[in-house]
């Protein structure tokens, strides 16, 4: 039902009013919620139009709680100047202060709407109508990318040289600037992204993107990411930066940075995702001032305490970045740890590299054989190692632990695919020399006093030993350590 009233005064401006009432019973919509509707279900609609020759205001209601207020301009093309749509409201809201569209919507499934626009839904909008470029969307809940985003506000508007989208909510505070002739800039002030939590899964069970479908980089923009505080899959990472450039099937990462405050990872890399094959290469450095503080930040315990560390890596493999293929892993890892100590030799997770080389297991063996010497832990001035990896097999010939009680040199290989060890270790006791005590005092007086006291009560066996040789074999998780040589100090050879 419709009512139309028109005024055409001899002097003055023409005006008109149109009132339309209906129930849309025979109308159906297959669009995603909240605008989906089956046929045969009544939906009361009221539309009121009032205006003149240059513009008109359109207000109305859809159902009992959905209201719209808008202003249209009768230019060369019909132009929507501004509008506001509110759901779950008692009446019309005032028009926005500036041209644009404001949508206050109920909880939404963002994935369904995104798929709709990717299939060209926006192309079906009539070209005879102009819409304002500024759009604001608010919703109490938005399901997108496997996560429920709460109290979301999205604003899209033009800026000089492109357009900009601002996103604010409980889990995000970010701005994406889509520049026309330059890389896009994602300035993220805060991000909490944990898609596993939305589905009730354990975060560790869903930590990587899906790999079933090959990603196609074509059409992707270059991107500069600046994230001040990032939480990913339930873990806080702190600052994350990176510049991504796309060329064909190749994604190049430069100036990559993850800074937790306790450790700093820098990286540059290339990801080739061509139909002929996938390849990833990463090169950079991991630095921190204290191993235990860095490990504690990620909720991991380590017996290595107070040691600064630098790890340089240059690695590549034939798989995506988030899923390294160990069998095709190649590269070099150089590690340096400064002064520190092993405080709990019974702990069986001394850090991945030390565990791979079974340094922790060897120290437990020494503690068992020479309990008087190692009962209070193992202090070291440095740990240095260069390891190269060839097709999943790690090799080293210069791993050296410069300890106060003993020096430990290691060489051999670790098969990362079969997780098997084939290593040799040489242990040279240092405690009987005054240099060891002096070095201990250099760490701190308490350590020096402990080492000095230990040197006074050592059994004669340790004082007489010049060199110990060990063979380390078996699986990484249960290494077999066998003593193959114990050379006395009085002998030059054995």
Image (cartoon, rainbow, N blue to C red):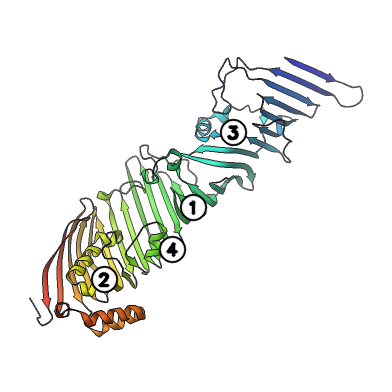
- Crowding around mark 4 (Cα neighbors within 10 Å: few <14, some 14 to 19, many 20+) is some
For disc 2, the marked residue is 401
- Marks 3 and 1, how far apart at CA: 27 Å
**Residue depicted at x 42% and y 44%:** 248
- Marks 4 and 2, how far apart at CA: 24 Å
Sequence order check: which comes first, mark 1 or mark 4?
A: 1
> Height in image: 251 above or below 302?
above
Q: Nearer the viewer, mark 3 or mark 2?
A: 3
Sequence order check: which comes first, mark 3 or mark 1?
A: 3
- Marks 4 and 3, how far apart at CA: 41 Å
> What is the quadrant of residue 294 in the picture?
bottom left
Q: Is 169 or 332 nearer to us in this picture?
A: 169
Q: Is there a contact, CB below 8 Å, between mark 3 and mark 2?
A: no
For disc 1, the marked residue is 230
> What is the quadrant of residue 375 in the picture?
bottom left
Percent position of residue 27, x then y: 60, 17
Asked which secondary structure carries label 2, the reply is strand
- Crowding around mark 1 (Cα neighbors within 10 Å: few <14, some 14 to 19, many 20+) is many
Q: Quadrant of the N terminus?
A: top right
**Residue depicted at x 61% and y 38%:** 137
- Marks 1 and 4, how far apart at CA: 15 Å
Asked which secondary structure carries label 4, the reply is loop
Q: Nearer the viewer, mark 3 or mark 1?
A: 3
- Crowding around mark 2 (Cα neighbors within 10 Å: few <14, some 14 to 19, many 20+) is many
> Height in image: 43 above or below 404?
above
């Amino acid at each position: 039902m419709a009512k139309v009233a028109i005024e055409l005064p001899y002097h003055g401006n023409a005006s008109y009013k149109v009132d339309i009432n209906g129930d849309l019973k025979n109308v159906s919509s297959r669009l995603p919620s909240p605008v989906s509707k089956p046929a045969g279900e009544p939906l009361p609609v009221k539309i009121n139009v009032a205006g003149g020759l240059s513009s008109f205001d359109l207000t109305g209601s859809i159902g009992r709680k959905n209201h719209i207020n808008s202003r249209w301009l009768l230019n060369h093309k019909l132009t929507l100047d501004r509008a506001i749509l509110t759901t779950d409201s008692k009446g019309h809201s005032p028009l926005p202060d500036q041209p644009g569209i404001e949508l206050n919507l109920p909880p939404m499934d963002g994935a369904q709407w995104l798929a709709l626009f990717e299939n060209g839904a926006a192309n079906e909008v009539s070209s005879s109508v102009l819409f304002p470029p500024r759009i604001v969307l608010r919703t109490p809940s938005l399901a997108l990318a496997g996560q429920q985003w709460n109290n979301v506000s999205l604003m899209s508007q033009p800026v000089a040289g492109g357009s900009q989208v601002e996103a604010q909510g409980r889990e995000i505070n970010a701005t994406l600037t889509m520049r026309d002739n330059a890389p896009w800039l994602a300035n993220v002030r805060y991000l909490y992204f944990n898609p596993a939590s939305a589905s009730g899964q354990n975060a560790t069970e869903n930590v990587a993107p899906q790999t079933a479908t090959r990603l196609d980089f074509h059409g992707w923009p270059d991107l500069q990411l600046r994230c001040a505080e990032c939480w990913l899959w339930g873990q806080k990472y702190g600052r994350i930066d990176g510049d991504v450039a796309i060329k064909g099937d190749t994604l190049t990462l430069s100036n990559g940075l993850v800074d937790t405050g306790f450790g700093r990872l820098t990286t540059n890399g290339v990801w080739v995702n061509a139909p002929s094959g996938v390849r990833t290469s990463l090169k950079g450095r991991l630095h921190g001032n204290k191993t235990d503080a860095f490990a504690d930040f990620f909720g991991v315990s380590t017996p290595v305490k107070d040691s600064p560390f630098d790890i340089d890596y240059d690695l590549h493999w034939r798989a995506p970045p988030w899923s390294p293929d160990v069998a095709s892993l190649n590269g070099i890892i150089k590690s340096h740890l400064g002064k520190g100590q092993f405080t709990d030799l019974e702990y069986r997770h001394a850090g991945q590299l030390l565990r791979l080389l079974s340094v922790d297991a060897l120290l437990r063996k020494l503690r068992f054989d020479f309990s008087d010497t190692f009962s209070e832990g193992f202090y070291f001035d440095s740990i240095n190692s260069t390891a190269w990896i060839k097709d999943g097999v790690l090799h080293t010939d210069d791993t050296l632990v410069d300890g106060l009680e003993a020096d430990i040199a290691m060489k051999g290989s670790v098969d990362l695919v079969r997780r098997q060890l084939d290593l040799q270790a040489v242990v040279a006791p240092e405690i009987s020399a005054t240099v060891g005590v002096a070095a201990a005092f250099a760490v701190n007086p308490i350590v020096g006093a402990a080492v000095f006291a230990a040197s006074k009560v050592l059994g004669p066996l340790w004082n007489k030993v010049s060199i110990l040789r060990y063979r380390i074999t078996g699986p990484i998780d249960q290494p077999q350590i066998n003593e193959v040589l114990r050379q006395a100090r009085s002998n030059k050879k054995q």
